Amino acid sequence: MASNGPGTSQEEFKWKARVSWVTGERSVAYSRNNSFLIEKQASFKEKDPHPSAIEYLLGALGGDIAAGFQTVAPRFGVSIEALEISLSGQLNNSLTMLGVIGEAGHPGLETIEGRIFISTEATEEKIEKVWQSVQDRSPLFNTLKRAVKLDFSLVIVL
């Protein structure tokens, strides 16, 4: 096993979660000292009491990217005044998730699109370098880009 220094190993850096079914299509996820409800795999309703699994995935990716910007930007001498990330995901064929007979394809995400709205006085060139570094360092971006088409754009807002 690879070592990360004295007394450390990759095993020490394993993240864990436990999920328990509650009722219907609702589950609760536990990780460290946190818990959150997951309503369904994906929902087609306009409103639900809790996010679906797909919405948590999109939110987690957005949170990972936002945290990455806050970590990386200072290393490039960039100050960020505001940051917002809008994400959407498209399933390959949502009817396969519903079990519709005769449907081709799969219920997995085909694409994830994101628009990153960033307010900063930094140049576009510098922000592009920050964004590239964020992508290179992001655990979720790197995991998902191997399975899903990721299409992101930066919008600099003054």
Image (cartoon, rainbow, N blue to C red):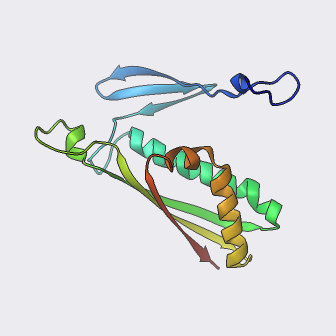
- Residue furthest to the left: 102
Residue 147 position within the rendered picture, expressed as x and y whole percent measured from the top left: 45, 46
Q: Give above or below for 22 relative to 126.
A: above
In the image, is 97 to the left or to the right of 77? left
**Quarter residue 11 falls in:** top right
User: How many numbered marks are there?
Assistant: 0
Viewer-proximal residue, 45 or 69? 69
Residue displayed at 61% across by 75% down: 156
**Quarter residue 154 falls in:** bottom right
Residue 106 position within the rendered picture, expressed as x and y whole percent measured from the top left: 27, 42
Viewer-proximal residue, 128 or 77? 128
Q: Identify the image quadrant of the C terminus.
A: bottom right
Residue 101 position within the rendered picture, expressed as x and y whole percent measured from the top left: 11, 37
Q: Give above or below for 66 relative to 95.
A: below
Residue 133 position within the rendered picture, expressed as x and y whole percent measured from the top left: 70, 58
In the image, is 91 to the left or to the right of 7? left
In the image, is 119 to the left or to the right of 144? right
Residue displayed at 34% across by 43% down: 108
**Quarter residue 14 falls in:** top right
Residue 98 seen by the camera: yes
Q: Identify the image quadrant of the N terminus.
A: top right
Residue displayed at 15% across by 44% down: 103
In the image, is 150 to the left or to the right of 110? right
Residue 51 seen by the camera: no
Residue displayed at 57% across by 62% down: 84
Q: Give above or below for 71 relative to 28.
A: below
- Residue furthest to the front: 1
Q: Give above or below for 29 relative to 150.
A: above
Viewer-proximal residue, 116 or 111? 111
